[in-house]
Image (cartoon, rainbow, N blue to C red):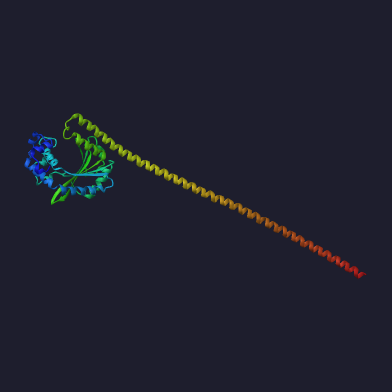
């Protein structure tokens, strides 16, 4: 339904606001309706700004997924009523005097973007990414459950840690941008997927009918603790996977070194074998050379003996010839 057609009674009924709550709020219906109407007319332009934030945040590699929304006009009006009720847990003095001309300066979540991630430690990397994209209007706040605050001692100094009474865990940022010559705030929430699931269930169950139901609130608190344990388990499994990968790499490196060493040793054995074979070949060659030398020496000796024998034979023959010749002369 358009805000222009919305009546006061319909608004109170749709948003479960009792007459007593309505009466204690100083906001008037004409002022509240004017705020809702102004916001409704600007919704399309706000959607474009929200999409721009979502596209930029999604480019961060550590972001699993991004959700965004522009605040519904009636939800904005209901929030203003809650924030202007004195002595209520939701009262905020800065909402006093709010109107259609200044509401966008007071309400910081007209545009809401949620950046979801898998592991808790991814949040710090996403924080650095966001700081490089925009300048925050307010210091970032890390909301934690009571008992979680000591876990985040390593957070950057510009992040404030606050305990959320309902147990929400989420990093909250408020960034500013210019829209139609007016400064618009965008709230960015960074949380794990487990935290997002619990938040969604908590909002649908606790609000608006069971915020004071002790039994339901107790079970939601137990559920919240289980979500925290799930996040811790996710981080633990991630670390186990990293260590397993490191061990596998070390084993692969060791195996490669062993194989390389074995290959080198085999190469050395081959060279040694080749050297031994060559040595045997050399020894055989030397033996052959030795045999040839011995054969040469034997041949030389035989030759010398042959020469000597021939010389003796020749001398004897000559003597004999001389003898025969003398015999002929005597005759």
Describe residue 317's horizontal placement relative to residue 170 as left or right.
right
**Residue 93 drawn at (x, y percent):** 11, 40
Describe residue 57's horizontal placement relative to residue 34 as left or right.
right
Q: How many labels does the image show?
A: 0
**Most foreground residue, 259 or 200:** 200
Q: Report which quarter residue 138 is drawn in.
A: top left
**Most foreground residue, 188 or 17:** 17
Q: Which residue is drawn at 86% across and 67% down?
A: 321
Q: In this view, does 297 lie above or below 228?
A: below
**Residue 29 drawn at (x, y percent):** 7, 40
Q: Which residue is drawn at 42% across and 43% down?
A: 251
State the quadrant of the N terminus: top left
**Residue 262 drawn at (x, y percent):** 49, 46
Residue 262 can be seen in this image: yes
Describe residue 20's horizontal placement relative to residue 119 as left or right.
left
**Residue 271 drawn at (x, y percent):** 54, 51
Residue 98 can be seen in this image: no
Q: Report which quarter residue 199 is drawn in.
A: top left
Q: Which residue lies furthest to the right in this view?
A: 331
**Most foreground residue, 159 or 131:** 131
State the quadrant of the C terminus: bottom right
Q: Residue furthest top?
A: 215
Q: Which residue is drawn at 48% across and 47% down?
A: 261
């Amino acid at each position: 339904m358009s805000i222009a057609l919305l009546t006061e009674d319909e608004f109170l009924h749709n948003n479960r606001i009792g007459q007593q709550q309505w009466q204690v709020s100083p906001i008037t219906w004409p002022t509240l309706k004017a705020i809702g109407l102004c916001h409704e007319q600007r919704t399309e332009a706000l959607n474009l700004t929200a999409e721009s934030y979502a596209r930029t945040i999604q480019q961060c590699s550590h972001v699993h997924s991004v959700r965004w929304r522009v605040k519904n006009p009636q939800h904005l009006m209901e929030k203003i009523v809650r924030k202007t009720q004195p002595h209520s847990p939701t009262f905020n003095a800065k909402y006093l005097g709010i109107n259609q001309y200044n509401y966008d300066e007071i309400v910081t979540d007209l545009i809401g973007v949620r950046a979801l991630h898998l592991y808790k430690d991814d949040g710090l990397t996403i924080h650095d990414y966001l700081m490089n994209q925009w300048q925050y209007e307010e210091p970032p706040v890390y909301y934690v459950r009571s008992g979680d605050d000591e876990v985040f001692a390593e957070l950057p100094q510009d992040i404030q840690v606050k305990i959320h009474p309902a147990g929400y865990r989420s990093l909250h940022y408020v960034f500013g941008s210019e829209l139609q010559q007016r400064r618009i705030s965008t709230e960015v929430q960074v949380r794990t997927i487990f935290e997002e699931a619990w938040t969604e269930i908590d909002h649908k169950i606790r609000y608006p009918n069971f915020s004071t139901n002790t039994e339901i609130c107790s079970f939601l608190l137990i559920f919240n603790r289980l979500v925290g344990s799930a996040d811790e388990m996710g981080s633990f499994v991630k670390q186990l996977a990293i260590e397993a990968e490191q061990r596998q790499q070390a084993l692969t490196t060791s195996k490669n070194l062993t194989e390389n060493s074995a290959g080198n040793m085999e190469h050395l054995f081959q060279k040694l074998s080749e050297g031994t074979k060559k040595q045997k070949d050399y020894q055989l060659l030397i033996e052959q050379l030795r045999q040839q030398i011995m054969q040469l020496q034997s041949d030389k000796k035989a030759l010398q003996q042959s020469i000597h024998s021939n010389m003796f034979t020749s001398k004897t023959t000559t003597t004999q010839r001389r003898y025969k010749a003398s015999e002929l002369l005597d005759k």
